[in-house]
Amino acid sequence: MRTFKEKDFSERREAAAKAKEAALRKFTERKAEDDPAAIARKAARLDAAKAREARAAERKAKELEEKARLAEEKAKNAAEAELEVAKQAERQAALAAEQKAARDARYAARKAKQ
């Protein structure tokens, strides 16, 4: 069985230089920005970004409409509840007045008998 041979400094330096050279060669061989395919891809990306922004704005508008509708509904429910409480208080006051009138009538009838 062979033992693992560790690379020395010069071998690592040569490998790094080759990698740097390969990266530089790849960069210089890259197509120019005026390539029609690159321009088409860039235009497609811009169109997609605009569509994404439009959808986000539409979603935001719908959220605002929903919040406004919920706030309006909440205010309407609160007003109805307040009106119901006022009607209940009025009925309670009328019932109390009616009970007092009946009680006073009974008291007056009792006093009249004496």
Image: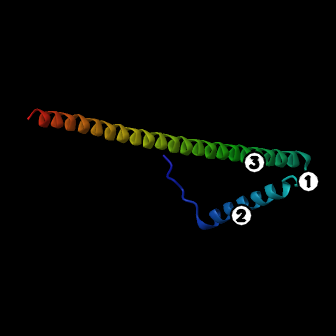
Say what secondary structure mark 3 lies in.
helix
Which residue lies at the image location 86% right of the left edge and 48% below the top edge? 38
Percent of width and height locating residue 41: 83, 45
Give the amino acid at mark 2: Ala
**Residue position for label 2:** 17
Q: Which residue is mark 3?
A: 49
User: Residue 31: x percent and y percent?
Assistant: 87, 52
Tell me whether the residue at label 1 lies in contact with that at label 3, contact meaning CB atoms closer than 8 angstroms: no
Residue under circle 1?
A: 34
Q: Nearer the viewer, mark 1 or mark 3?
A: 3
Residue placed most toward the observer, 101 or 39: 101
| Left or right, 64 with reference to 6 | right
Report, in whole angstroms, how far the alpha carbon at label 3 lies from the one at label 2. 40 Å
| Residue 78 percent across, percent down from the top left | 47, 43
Identified at 60% across, 67% down, the residue is 9
* Earlier sequence position, callout 1 versus callout 3: 1
Dot 2 surroundings within 10 Å: few (below 14), some, or many (20 or more)? few
Earlier residue among tags 2 and 1: 2
Q: Disc 3 residue type?
A: Ala
How would you rate the neighbour count of disc 1 (Cα within 10 Å): few for under 14, some for 14-19, many for 20 or more? few
The residue drawn where x is 48% and y is 46% is 1
Residue closest to the eye, 72 or 102 = 102
| Amino acid type for the residue under numbered disc 1 | Asp
Front of the two marks 2 and 1: 1
| Residue 3 place in picture, x, y as percent | 49, 52
Quadrant position of residue 33? bottom right
> Residue 63's quadrant in the figure?
top right
